[in-house]
Image (tube, coloured by chain):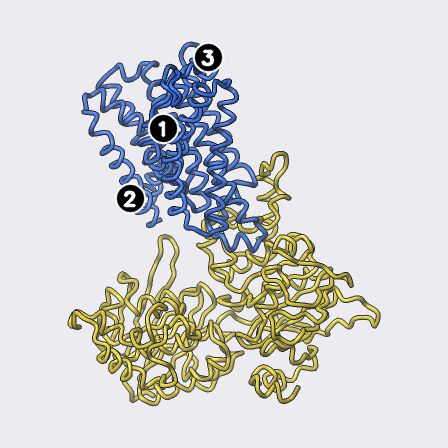
Chain colours: A blue, B yellow
């Protein structure tokens, strides 16, 4: 009995995931086709990337709620740089990442120096950024040919290279964003699980005062967590802009909840009970598999958020109830 | 004694947690009008037994009898209705800091189903007055926030409230662990009065001298089983023997005598810790263990914090090997070779989600990481295993979770994390709180064997703990160093006098 509990804590989530994967395939063979599998991955890429940043902040016992609007900001800034300012794709990426890191720094300073609680600080920043991103384009979406305030048309274009980031395929099959997601996940995994930094992030999350008293630079690490989170979120925004090919004002909506959801579902994977990179990615993919499969079985789109909620709440209840009995 | 009926009895109590047998066939009787001391090493099962009696663990083997009748308490509320009131170790779980004294005292009324819907200030005040009477709390302002009170006053409030239900059995779990000796004396007077009133008191403590002083009988639990019951008269040595068997004798060690021209390892020169305090002067030589005692609030922890870079001193110098050093942060202290085991283990030392290995290597992660900060797991494990073996942490391996260990073993982990390397000064602030006597002994042996190149400063309010480890005893009182004695020339009465002097007396004599 005890072994069953231990096993289900450890592998329960993966078993459910594999079962649904097999089940959908049996019910609808097209589910298993390579293009479909990659479209699932592509569908989860953006919020999975954002969730990686959220995972870092969760590890320090914080939570970055501004990742969604940071990504949206990045979408608008990338478009604005190329379309209105007619800058190169590389310049656009650099600008976006810089802004992302600055937003993270702002969050970090707000939390560490002014001592605003994490949730409130990043909630405030979320609002701030959501509003700020609308100002340069006066609230309109940005695309080639849009009317500028001085009456001229914006003649800049998304560069080929920039678009490749979001729309390219490697071997004519694997979408480039998926590769970026996996690479980034690997890097963050190494940082959190294999490097000294990660150990300190988790130590701070476990007991900040004890960490301080063994010499950890707690404030610096916490700021760094938010800077990384902002940086990663803005990179997610870059990929999103490249995929859509225009600066859509509503592009950031829904990203935050999906990202936080994936990171929290990750607690259940392999019985980790703590934020972890593998769990975050698996959690994001699981949601993708579920939504894709159910859609193929003609579940109406308006059920999607409900399904995500069910998965999240069940995963959390499962993690915390079963693991407590250990 | 035999003609009296026990008020509460526990019979053949057993309890398992998974594969661990925490308690096995334990029986005790508690009589009215007696203080029953319950002792046992850490992890022996004291807390488990208490939690069974007070209804916290509803499923157990054996039975609890009240006035000879078997009862089953399935919640602490049940137990209270049966006349068993408990004051738990952590005071602040027993009082609500954001409420006034009166509200805290009348809490049961405020929460009761029969209470009125609206708060009636006069009624609360009246209830509080009645409840506070047996504990003589008249000196407290009833409208004061509990958050502004001392630990001992909070303790008294918790006890007063427990007594309000007129319990047959009052359980006190480590009631002196966070109050000073003088405050403890007040508590003991109160307990003696309650005993005279016929209350049965179950008194759990690590502090055997207290038990010797106040208990009528002592029950010993050893490794989850019934050890024995000692009737008065008994002494600490007998209790210790019953608890852990014969300890290695603490030998009459000779203090190291520094050569006349030896430069002290650590010197405090006119160090002013807090504004308004007298300057402190203290020298600790290489290989020496200085024990610092004094009541809570005497300034020990404040000094430790200054030495470890947690706080800045107001004035004065800290010298290592005769050279003044500036310690502006914890990091700087660690770089200078000054380490500290903080007073509050749970909140300030342990990282609960981490395993033993990760807890041990926390301060010196850079030693276990290479290129790009990648951790070298095998080396880390090897080192952690070595430390666990040397200090004798009882665990299934270096990857066990730290929160599964007993207090004593947790403390061993916390101490050993600093001893991986040489140090100039290691400060241990109240290192024996919640640590059983066997672990205390292990820790003492271990730190002594590792202090050849450094200086040790051990701080504890308990004089016996200090005498067990120190080469020299320094007494602090009201932020001053008021005296010192070398081991071998100890006069307890003088040390206690220094410790107990009030600040007024101190001002007169100085």
Q: Residue furthest top?
A: A172
Q: Secondary structure at mark 3?
A: helix
Q: On the image, numbered disc 1 is attached to which residue? A: A138
Above or below: residue A188 compared with residue B359: above
Residue A312, quarter of the rendered image: top left
Q: On the image, numbered disc 2 is attached to which residue? A: A317
Q: Tell which of B72 and A60 is nearer to you.
A: A60
The chain letter for the residue carrying disc 3 is A
- Mark 3: few/some/many CA within 10 Å (<14, 14-19, 20+): few
Q: Earlier in the sequence, mark 1 or mark 3?
A: 1
- Percent of width and height locating residue A206: 46, 50
For the residues tagged 3 and 2, is the chain the same?
Answer: yes
Q: Residue at x 49, y 38 (%)?
A: A227
Q: Residue furthest front?
A: A150
Kindly tell me whether residue A41 is visible in this rendering: no
Name the side, left or right, on which B500 lies relative to B111: right
Residue B509, quarter of the rendered image: bottom right
For the residues tagged 1 and 2, is the chain the same?
Answer: yes
Name the side, left or right, on which A231 lies relative to B261: left
- Percent of width and height locating residue B189: 42, 87
């Amino acid at each position: 009995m005890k072994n069953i509990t231990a096993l289900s804590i450890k592998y329960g989530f993966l078993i459910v995931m594999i079962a649904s994967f097999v089940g959908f395939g049996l019910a609808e063979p097209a589910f298993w086709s390579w293009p479909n599998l990659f479209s699932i991955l592509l569908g989860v890429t953006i919020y999975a990337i954002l969730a990686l940043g959220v995972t870092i902040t969760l590890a320090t016992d914080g939570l970055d709620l501004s990742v969604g609007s940071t990504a949206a900001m990045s979408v608008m800034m990338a478009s604005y740089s190329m379309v209105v300012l007619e800058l190169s794709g590389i310049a656009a990426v650099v600008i976006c990442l810089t802004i992302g890191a600055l937003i993270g720094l702002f969050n970090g300073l707000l939390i560490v120096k002014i001592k605003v609680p994490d949730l409130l600080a990043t909630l405030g920043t979320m609002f701030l950024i959501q509003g700020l991103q609308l100002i340069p384009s006066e609230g309109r979406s940005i695309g080639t040919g849009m009317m500028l305030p001085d009456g001229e048309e914006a003649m800049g274009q998304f560069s080929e290279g920039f678009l490749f980031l979001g729309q390219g395929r490697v071997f004519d099959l694997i979408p480039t964003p998926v590769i970026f997601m996996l690479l980034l996940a690997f890097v963050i995994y190494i940082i959190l699980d294999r490097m000294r930094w990660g150990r300190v992030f988790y130590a701070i999350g476990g007991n900040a005062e004890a960490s301080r008293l063994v010499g950890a630079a707690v404030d610096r690490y916490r700021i760094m967590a938010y800077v990384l989170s902002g940086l990663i979120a803005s990179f997610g925004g870059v990929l999103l802009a490249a995929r859509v090919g225009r600066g859509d004002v509503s592009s950031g909506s829904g990203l935050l909840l999906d990202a936080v959801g994936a990171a929290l579902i990750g607690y259940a994977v392999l019985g980790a009970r703590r934020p972890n990179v593998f769990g975050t990615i698996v959690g994001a993919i699981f949601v993708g598999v579920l939504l894709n499969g159910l859609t193929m079985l003609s579940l109406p789109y308006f059920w999607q958020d409900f399904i995500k909620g069910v998965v999240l709440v069940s995963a959390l209840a499962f993690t915390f109830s079963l693991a407590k009995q250990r | 004694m035999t003609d009296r009926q026990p008020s509460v009895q526990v019979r053949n109590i057993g309890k398992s947690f998974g594969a661990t047998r925490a308690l096995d066939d334990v029986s005790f009787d508690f009589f009215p009008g007696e203080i029953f001391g319950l002792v046992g090493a850490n992890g022996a099962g004291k807390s488990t037994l208490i939690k069974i009696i007070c209804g916290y663990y509803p499923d157990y083997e054996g039975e609890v009898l009240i006035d000879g009748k078997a009862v089953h308490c399935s919640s602490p509320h049940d137990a209270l209705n049966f006349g068993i009131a408990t004051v738990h170790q952590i005071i602040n779980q027993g009082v609500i800091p954001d409420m006034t004294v009166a509200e805290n005292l009348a809490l049961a009324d405020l929460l009761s189903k029969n209470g009125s819907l609206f708060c009636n200030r006069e009624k609360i005040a009246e209830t509080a007055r009645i409840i506070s009477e047996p504990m003589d709390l008249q000196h407290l302002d009833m409208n004061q926030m509990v958050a502004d009170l001392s630990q001992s006053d909070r303790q008294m409030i918790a006890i007063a409230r427990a007594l309000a239900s007129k319990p047959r059995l009052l359980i006190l779990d480590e009631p002196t662990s966070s109050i000073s000796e003088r405050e403890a004396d007040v508590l003991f007077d109160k307990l003696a009065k309650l005993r005279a009133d016929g209350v049965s008191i179950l008194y759990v403590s690590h502090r055997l001298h207290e038990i010797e002083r106040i208990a009528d009988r002592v029950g010993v639990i050893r490794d989850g089983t019934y050890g024995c019951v000692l009737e008065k008269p008994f002494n600490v040595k007998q209790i210790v023997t019953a608890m852990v068997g014969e300890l290695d004798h603490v030998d009459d060690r000779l203090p190291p005598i520094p050569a006349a021209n030896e430069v002290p390892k650590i010197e405090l020169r006119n160090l002013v810790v807090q504004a308004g305090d007298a300057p402190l002067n203290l020298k600790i030589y290489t290989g020496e263990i200085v024990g610092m005692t004094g009541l809570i609030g005497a300034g020990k922890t404040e000094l430790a914090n200054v030495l470890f870079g947690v706080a800045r001193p107001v004035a004065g110098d800290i010298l290592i090997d005769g050279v003044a050093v500036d310690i502006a942060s914890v990091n700087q202290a660690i770089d200078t070779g000054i380490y500290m085991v903080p007073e509050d283990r749970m909140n300030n030392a342990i990282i609960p989600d981490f395993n033993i290995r990760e807890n041990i290597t926390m301060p010196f992660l850079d030693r276990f990481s290479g290129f790009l900060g990648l951790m070298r797991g095998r080396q880390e494990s090897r080192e952690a295993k070595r430390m666990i073996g040397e200090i004798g942490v009882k665990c299934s391996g270096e990857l066990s979770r730290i929160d599964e260990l007993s207090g004593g073993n947790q403390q061993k982990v916390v101490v050993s994390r600093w001893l991986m390397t040489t140090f100039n000064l290691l400060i241990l602030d109240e290192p024996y709180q919640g640590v059983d006597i066997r672990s205390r002994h292990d820790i003492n042996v271990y730190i002594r064997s590792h202090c050849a190149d450094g200086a040790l400063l051990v701080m504890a309010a308990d004089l016996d703990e200090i005498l067990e480890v120190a080469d020299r005893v320094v007494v602090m009182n009201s932020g001053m160093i008021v005296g010192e004695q070398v081991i071998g020339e100890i006069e307890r009465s003088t040390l206690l006098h220094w410790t107990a002097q009030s600040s007024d007396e101190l001002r007169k004599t100085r």
